[in-house]
């Protein structure tokens, strides 16, 4: 499932290509055809993201999109290729097109419904003005592990499996630490780090989490080869040596996903 930086990048890409211009709106698959007809020919005014939710704004009407596990976007220059019958939503103007396939959600919602979606989500490190204290109020009262809390979109929106594993490693935090045992100071440091890492993710359109002194060039090691791209400390590196201590990276299931961590660098606090 794409993490929050990917959705914010999609919002930026739609803003740059479609905002302020009338668009052809189609649903070749047919599942969004009624709503597409209501939007066809109107100008897309804005686009925004909150966590893993994308919103395309058409003057009080919003296309709410959640990619889920299988959703994918293709954005390109016109002329657009003939759409296949798997395209749920196609936007097109004279210069660009975007095709959405396989989303969990693609629905037309009004302002009130959109507001309700925002209200049930936690603060997003990529949304200006979102308050980390809102997340910490829930974390500080919870016996749930911090690794599970970071994946709970009601607590903090946009963090997925990669950022969860990596930010906990970068701060030397045992992933099984209960939320109530995390100090506010440490939480604020995690939040600030997520803001920086995820902004870089938007800019580069990939996740890089290693510090300059731990890059392949600095350490004289081979670069990472992985479908997700980017240099990381622990994600998908189970049984491999830690870049810092040479200890073995471990993995285990947690919050319905595989967790990765270094038991040496992320020791439980006594």
Image (cartoon, rainbow, N blue to C red):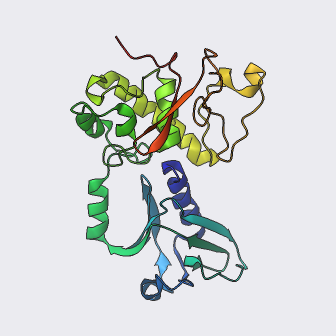
Comparing 78 with 265, the one in front is 265
Query: As displayed, is residue 246 above or below residue 230?
Result: above
Query: As displayed, is residue 224 above or below residue 18?
Result: above
Query: As displayed, is residue 198 above or below residue 246?
Result: below
Name the residue: 51% across, 73% down: 20
> Is residue 241 visible to us here?
yes
Outermost residue, left side: 141
Percent position (x, y) of residue 169? 50, 26
Lateral position of residue 65 relative to residue 75, left or right: left
Q: Quadrant of the C terminus?
A: top left
Q: Quadrant of residue 56?
A: bottom left
Percent position (x, y) of residue 14? 55, 65
Q: Quadrant of residue 106?
A: bottom left
Comparing 145 with 119, the one in front is 145
> Total number of numbered labels?
0
Percent position (x, y) of residue 85? 61, 82
> Is residue 58 visible to us here?
no
Lateral position of residue 20 relative to residue 219, left or right: left
Query: As displayed, is residue 113 above or below residue 178?
Result: below
Comparing 266 with 19, the one in front is 266
Name the residue: 63% across, 67% down: 74
Lateral position of residue 5 relative to residue 83, left or right: left
């Amino acid at each position: 499932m794409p993490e929050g930086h990917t959705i914010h990048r999609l919002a930026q890409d739609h803003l740059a290509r479609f905002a302020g211009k009338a668009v052809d709106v189609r649903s070749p698959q047919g599942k969004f055809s009624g709503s597409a007809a209501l939007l066809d020919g109107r100008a897309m005014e804005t686009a925004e993201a909150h966590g893993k939710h994308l919103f395309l704004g058409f003057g009080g009407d919003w296309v709410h999109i959640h990619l889920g596990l299988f959703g994918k976007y293709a954005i390109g220059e016109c002329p657009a290729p003939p759409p296949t019958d798997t395209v749920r939503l196609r936007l097109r103007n004279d210069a660009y097109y975007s095709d959405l396939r396989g989303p969990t959600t693609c629905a037309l919602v009004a302002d009130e419904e959109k507001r309700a979606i925002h209200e049930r989500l936690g603060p997003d490190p990529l949304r200006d003005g979102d308050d980390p204290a809102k997340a910490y109020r829930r974390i500080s009262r919870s016996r749930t592990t911090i690794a599970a809390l970071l994946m709970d979109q009601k607590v903090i929106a946009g963090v997925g499996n990669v950022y969860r594993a990596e930010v906990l490693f970068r701060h030397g935090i045992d992933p099984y630490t209960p939320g109530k045992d995390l100090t506010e100071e440490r939480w604020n440091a995690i939040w600030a780090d997520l803001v920086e890492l995820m902004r870089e993710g938007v800019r580069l359109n990939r996740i890089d989490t290693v510090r300059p002194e731990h890059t392949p060039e600095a350490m004289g090691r081979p670069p990472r080869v992985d479908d997700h791209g980017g240099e990381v400390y622990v994600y998908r590196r189970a049984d491999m040596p830690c870049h810092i201590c040479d200890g073995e990276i471990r993995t285990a299931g947690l919050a319905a996903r595989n967790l990765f961590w270094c038991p040496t660098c992320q020791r439980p606090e006594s």
